[in-house]
Image: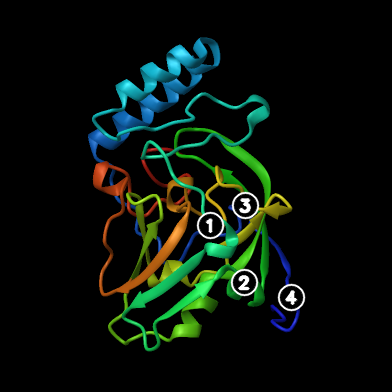
Amino acid sequence: MTDKADPAYDETYDKASGKPSDKTPGKPSPVGRRVIIGMLGLGAAGIVGGATIQRAIDRALAPVSKSVSGLVPAAGGGFRFYSVVDEVKPRPPAAYTLGVTGLVKAPRTFTFADLRALGQTRITAEFHCVTGWTVPGVRWQGVLLRDLLDRVGLDPAAKALRFRSFDGAYTESLTLAQARRPDVLVATSMLGGPISHDHGGPVRLYVAPMYGYKSLKWLSGIEVVDRVVPGYWEERGYDVDAWINASNGYG
């Protein structure tokens, strides 16, 4: 049981601990699977080909996205960096705001300082990308999404959440049941320090039991809605429910 008077607690997410109770895996479309397979193969080729291969990867994926950068695997099994736009202007913590709107009783805008002042939760977990790479033991810290929702109150018609990125293009979604899990964070820290711009800082979503595309970077807005609205990648063939080892034909 969590003591909310304590500023933070540690929770290690174990994917073998049980299946999510609200699991409703979908069947991926052929387009989504082809993209994933292509990213796997081209990402491996990037180890050898460097920048030349990277440009070829971007061209190959152009029908799906303007630019999917950072597909060349990083040394030592670290994070790869992806973006669906050509450039994202950094937003310093002092200028950051997060709006929570829609089917809520008290819409509110949170500053970075507001988020840091709320009860903080720590989670240590693997980060799984649907393209095949994993980073083990990533330390995250932030506000449980369910705690943020409790701050604004929910309308009885609320069924899902829609997330927006300040990159101006990327969106994601969760059902209300998924959003209220104890391993879903509005993250303000990772790897023991501030979230870098490349990692999606200063604030990003982290959904521990799902593939990385659900953990939206550069989080700028949360809208509570009456139904699931498929996000950027779901509109291009990825599963709306992205449970690790149970989505997109993997596992």
- Give percent across and percent down for residue 169: 32, 49
Answer with left or right where residue 228 lies relative to residue 130.
left
N-terminal-most mark, 4 or 1: 4
- Which amino acid, by three-letter code, is at mark 3? Ile
Graded by Cα atoms within 10 Å as few (under 14), some (14 to 19) or many (20 or more), the crowding at tag 2 reads: few
N-terminal-most mark, 3 or 1: 3
Give residue 7's mark. 4
Give residue 206's mark. 1
Graded by Cα atoms within 10 Å as few (under 14), some (14 to 19) or many (20 or more), the crowding at tag 4 reads: few
Q: Gap in Å between the C-alphas at discs 2 and 4? A: 15 Å
**Which of the two residues, 34 or 155, is positioned nearer the viewer here?**
155
- Which amino acid, by three-letter code, is at mark 1? Tyr
Q: Nearer the viewer, mark 4 or mark 3?
A: 3
- Which amino acid, by three-letter code, is at mark 2? Ala
Task: Name the residue at 64% across, 52% down.
Answer: 125
N-terminal-most mark, 4 or 3: 4
Residue that mark 3 sits on: 195
Q: Can residue 149 be seen in this view?
A: yes
| Residue lying furthest front | 95
Q: Can residue 184 be seen in this view?
A: no
**Which of the two residues, 154 or 82, is positioned nearer the viewer here?**
82
Q: Name the secondary structure under disc 1.
A: strand
N-terminal-most mark, 2 or 4: 4
Task: Name the residue at 37% across, 40% down.
Answer: 84
Give residue 113's mark. 2
Q: Gap in Å between the C-alphas at discs 4 and 3? A: 19 Å
Q: Gap in Å between the C-alphas at discs 4 and 1? A: 19 Å
Could you tell me if the residues under marks 3 and 2 are in contact, i.e. CB atoms within 8 Å?
no
Q: Gap in Å between the C-alphas at discs 1 and 2? A: 19 Å
